[in-house]
Amino acid sequence: MKGIYMDHNATTPVHPEVMEAMLPFFSEHFGNPSSIHWAGREVKKGVETARETVASFLKCDPKEIVFTGGGSEGDNLAIKGICEAYKDKGNHIITTKVEHPAVLNTCEYMEKQGFQVTYLPVDMDGMINLDDLKNAITEKTILITVMFANNETGTIFPIAEIGKIAKERKILFHTDAVQAAGKLHLDVNALNIDLLSISAHKLYGPKGIGALYVRKGVKIKPLIHGGGQERNRRAGTENVTGIVGIGKACEIAMRDMDAESERLLRLRERLHKGLTQKIEHVKLNGHPTMRLNNTLNVSFEYVEGESLLLNLDMDGVAASSGSACSSGSLEPSHVLTAMGLPHEVAHGSVRFSLGRSNTEADIDKIIEIMPPVVARLRAMSPLYGKSLNPVERTAAVCHH
Amino acid sequence: MYSEKVMEHFKNPRNVGEIENADGVGEVGNAACGDIMKLTIKVENNAIADVKFKTFGCGAAIATSSMVTELVKGKSLDEAEKISNATVAEALDGLPPVKMHCSNLAADALHAAIENYKKKK
């Protein structure tokens, strides 16, 4: 049985054209791009061509692109690099409660280094309020870091408005665009973005490579010291195959994104409609309209997400959940709890993130297998059907 | 990540449901952890004549609930009281470390049900 992969927000397969572009750079073109001889020069050309492609993908100058080891490194470099470079100007960062851990935990680390961080709340749809942002700004604010689109719910943030506010107040603006890249048009100048991180493996490129856009004139302290690669912003011999891969992945995204995005929207709506028609008490998590076309996060009330995922997996369907139990942590998703979802509803969430491989037949298969799975688990659930019997409910045994 | 036994109990859980007019009811866990178990027992001659469970939770929570019902059916109350969460996990050929605390509550539910029965008596 061929499996159905519906976890594209976690990662995507490398596109055949990307792999084809990368292959010669493993052994045929193997030189060190810093070398002046022929072997280095031909590889340098591959790296710089990729840089130009990534730059046109983000509508910036190639000199403004720093290749990184992925999305997390880009986020770390942006936040730590800016804080370090601008600490004389202030020590306040503004972010949101629903960022990816690569941003959240980096901000928490900066707090330990003496920085102050404001974590903006979100509403029921996972959306921030721009007034909250404006009110949070102080004269000490040096950086606003808000994700372009949320990885769990797909909610798209008002990046243009945030960029405008940041520019007016002369505050640097970083956005983690890891989920948005390849799904939305990114234009760093039109949106007044100063720093933007992307990761190749979310857009059919290889793992372990990303890019950080750093606006010309913005100072940044490197995380990794060594040689002068990446204009002294990221030392270390370039991950050449990865760089060629991310370049090709961006090229394909520019070519195919519009048509693909529309196709995925149709499929996603078919899935959402099918599930809500066939199953009661299905709740959408995320913004009803301002949302990535490929993402459907729904809670099947009264059942727990990992149980759902295990059942889906038995039928060959790969999806993910905001339930604590599936993530290896003990807490349910910080995104869903920030949206005010009751714990049991957050635990019942399943994220379907669609991508290139998915077809209408995949959608119909999920719509067919999901109702009996949910029915079986609900029949087993003490929460379903009647109000909780208050007898002998012992205190929390959840060992946090 | 789960043992074959856990998956077997997850796929075919034993004794699902709720005993009407149960002699003892035990409910443990909370929604924050994502695991709630409700166990109902029928007691005859100081032994567990019947037992059923309902569980909201992950694969481990459902499998441990199912396993505990299988372990205690027909056992005397004294024997049943000796069954611990560790016994249940062992009977399932172990649980992933992260699940040992959060989703291994089935014996707690059993003990709560027995206590509830004794209090009613």
Image (cartoon, coloured by chain):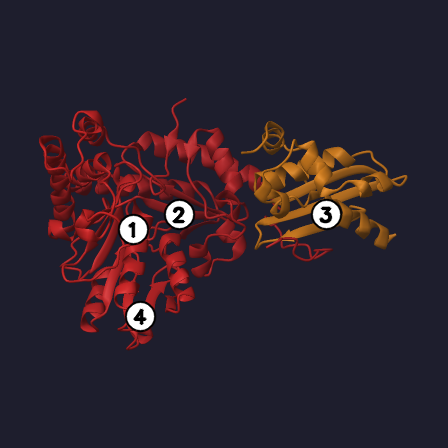
Chain colours: A red, B orange
Residue annotated with mark 2? A297
Q: Position of residue B2 (x, y in %)?
A: 57, 33
Q: Quadrant of the C terminus of chain A?
A: bottom right
Q: Is residue A250 visible?
A: yes
Q: Residue at x 33, y 67 (%)?
A: A94
Q: Distance between the residues labelled 3 and 2?
A: 33 Å
Q: What element carries label 1?
A: loop
Can you tell which of label 1 and label 3 is closer to the viewer? 1
Q: In this view, does B65 lie to the left or right of A344?
A: right
Can you tell which of label 4 and label 2 is closer to the viewer? 4
Q: Is residue B104 left or right of residue A296?
A: right
Residue annotated with mark 4? A133
Do tag 4 and tag 2 residues touch (Cβ < 8 Å)?
no
Q: In this view, does A266 lie to the left or right of B1?
A: left
Give the mark count: 4
Do tag 3 and tag 4 residues touch (Cβ < 8 Å)?
no
Q: What element carries label 4?
A: helix
Q: What element carries label 2?
A: strand
Q: What residue type is labelled 4?
A: Leu
Mark 4 vs 2, N-terminal side: 4
Q: In which quarter of the image is the N terminus of chain A?
A: top left
Q: Do pointers 3 and 4 mark residues of a single chain? A: no
Q: How crowded is mark 2: few (under 14 residues within 10 Å), some or many (20 or more)?
A: many
Q: In this view, does A356 lie above or below A77?
A: above
Q: Do pointers 1 and 3 mark residues of a single chain? A: no
- Kindly identify which numbered label has been placed on residue A224: 1
Residue annotated with mark 3? B108
Q: Residues within 10 Å of mark 1 (few under 14, many from 20)?
A: few
Q: Where is residue A320 in the image (x, y as percent from the top left)?
A: 43, 41
